[in-house]
Image (tube, rainbow, N blue to C red):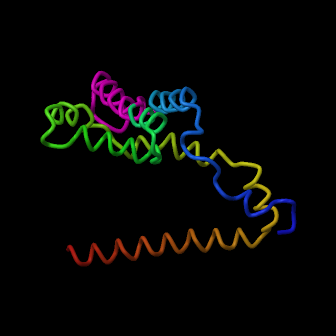
């Protein structure tokens, strides 16, 4: 490497336990609030149904984050949140039908919009320095990746449409 950075600068440090729980819960609450109007646009649910579904999903996230923070062994928060969601929706659980009824109308693709928007805007100085060092080569790679992904997706879609029709 040509600058002061070492390979260790690119490695993730710590785990989910190093996250400040209150900040993380606040951030999840902000995403939940942003997702409410998106759900109203994307679905035919009433405001009350959207609020109930989003609150249920927020509670799942809170429980998963609490488990991540306080249990004596480590699993990533996304694993704990997924496990809590799975446990709540297992058919033999007495609350499964009620919980599935709360979240069944929620459009999960619309939930991704605020997260993807943030990911697109959150460019760190490290990423900018890597881009500056790479120069025009990174642009060529990006264009090839985008074109390859588009052509590959179109080819798969065409194949599936030919087979199914």
Name the residue: 38% across, 41% down. 81
Res. 162 image quadrant: bottom left
Q: In which quarter of the image is residue 134?
A: bottom right
Residue 163, position as x, y percentages in the image: 23, 78
Residue at 82% across / 65% down in the picture?
133
The quarter of the image holding the N terminus is bottom right
Q: Does the magenta stretch include residue 20?
A: no
Q: Give the range drawn in magenta.
A: 35-62
Outermost residue toward the top? 48
Query: Would residue 39 be found to the left or right of residue 118 on screen?
Result: left
Name of the residue lying farthest toward the right: 3
Q: Where is residue 21 in the image (x, y as percent from the top left)?
A: 54, 30
Left or right? Give the position of 24 relative to 51: right
Q: Nearer the viewer, residue 128 or 40?
A: 128
Displayed quadrant of residue 73: top left
- From the viewer's side, name the closer residue of 69 and 26: 69
- Residue 58 is one of the magenta-drawn residues: yes
Image x and y of residue 74, in percent: 47, 46
């Amino acid at each position: 490497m040509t600058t002061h950075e070492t390979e260790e600068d690119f490695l993730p440090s710590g785990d989910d336990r190093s996250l400040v729980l209150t900040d993380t819960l606040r951030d999840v609450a902000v995403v939940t609030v942003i997702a409410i109007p998106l759900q109203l646009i994307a679905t035919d649910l009433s405001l009350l149904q959207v609020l109930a579904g989003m609150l249920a999903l927020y509670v799942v996230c809170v429980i998963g984050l609490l488990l991540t923070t306080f249990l004596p062994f480590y699993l990533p928060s996304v694993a704990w949140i997924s496990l809590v969601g799975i446990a709540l929706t297992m058919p033999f659980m007495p609350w499964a039908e009620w919980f599935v009824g709360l979240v069944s109308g929620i459009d999960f693709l619309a939930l991704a919009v605020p997260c993807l928007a943030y990911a697109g805007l959150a460019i760190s100085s490290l990423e900018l320095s890597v881009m500056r060092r790479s120069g025009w080569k990174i642009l060529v790679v990006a264009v090839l990746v985008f074109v390859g992904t588009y052509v590959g997706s179109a080819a798969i879609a065409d194949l599936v449409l030919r087979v199914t029709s």
